[in-house]
Amino acid sequence: MRDGLAEISATGAEMGMPYFLALLAEALGKAGEPDAGLVEIDRALSMANRLRGRFQLSEMLRLKGDLLAMLSKSRLPEAEACFRGALDVADRQGAKLPKLQAATSFARLLVRKGEVAQAHALLQPAYDAIVQGRDLTDLKAAAALLAELRAR
């Protein structure tokens, strides 16, 4: 991925780069390298800001929150701020799926903090707002988390 991004950058192209950097950040997080993922997601956010790009902004903020939450409890307040930002962007854009994704990540963080009722109150409306596509992975994950929250 890094080689491909370097080749794209060498052409001077910037369109789509924040998105591609976010994909790299996500892959690094899944590979157990959240610190390296944070470097890439910060590059993505910086480039998106410079280019005034709003495409995938909610997702990038959510991803940054997930990466921060992987690091340590001391980074949870930063992660929470990222999730709140992701929810705000998704709300302003009327983007239901990104809102659900951010709400799911934020709810997981709230569960870690022992705030189960708040997690449920945050996630349920975001889940209910999407009436189609219940077989999508993100909706299945949200439904499973809601079932877990109800069982507590």
Image (cartoon, rainbow, N blue to C red):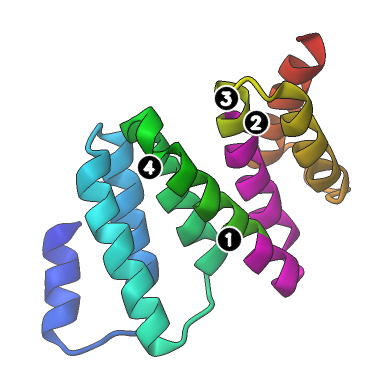
Sequence-first tag of 1 and 4? 4
- The residue shown at (15%, 59%) is 2
The percent position of residue 97, horizontal first and vertical second, equals: 69, 54
Distance (Cα) linking label 3 and label 4: 15 Å
Q: Secondary structure at mark 4?
A: helix
- The residue shown at (74%, 36%) is 135
Distance (Cα) linking label 1 and label 3: 19 Å
Predominant SS along the magenta part: helix
| Residue mark closest to the camera, 1 vs 3 | 3
Kind of residue at badge 3: Lys
Identify the residue position indicated by label 1 in the image. 85
Magenta residues, start to end: 88-108
Distance (Cα) linking label 2 and label 1: 21 Å
Q: Secondary structure at mark 1?
A: helix
Kind of residue at badge 2: Ala
Q: Is residue 145 left or right of residue 68?
A: right
Q: Identify which residue, 119 or 10, lies in the foreground.
A: 119
Kind of residue at badge 4: Leu
Kind of residue at badge 1: Gly
- Number of residues whose C-alpha sits closer than 10 Å to that of mark 4, classed few (under 14), some (14–19) or many (20 or more): many
* Quarter of the C terminus within the rendering: top right
Residue 97 magenta: yes
Badge number at residue 113:
3
Q: Are marks 1 and 3 in contact (CB under 8 Å)?
A: no
Residue 110 magenta: no
Q: Secondary structure at mark 3?
A: loop
| Residue mark closest to the camera, 2 vs 1 | 1
Identify the residue position indicated by label 4 in the image. 68
Sequence-first tag of 1 and 3? 1
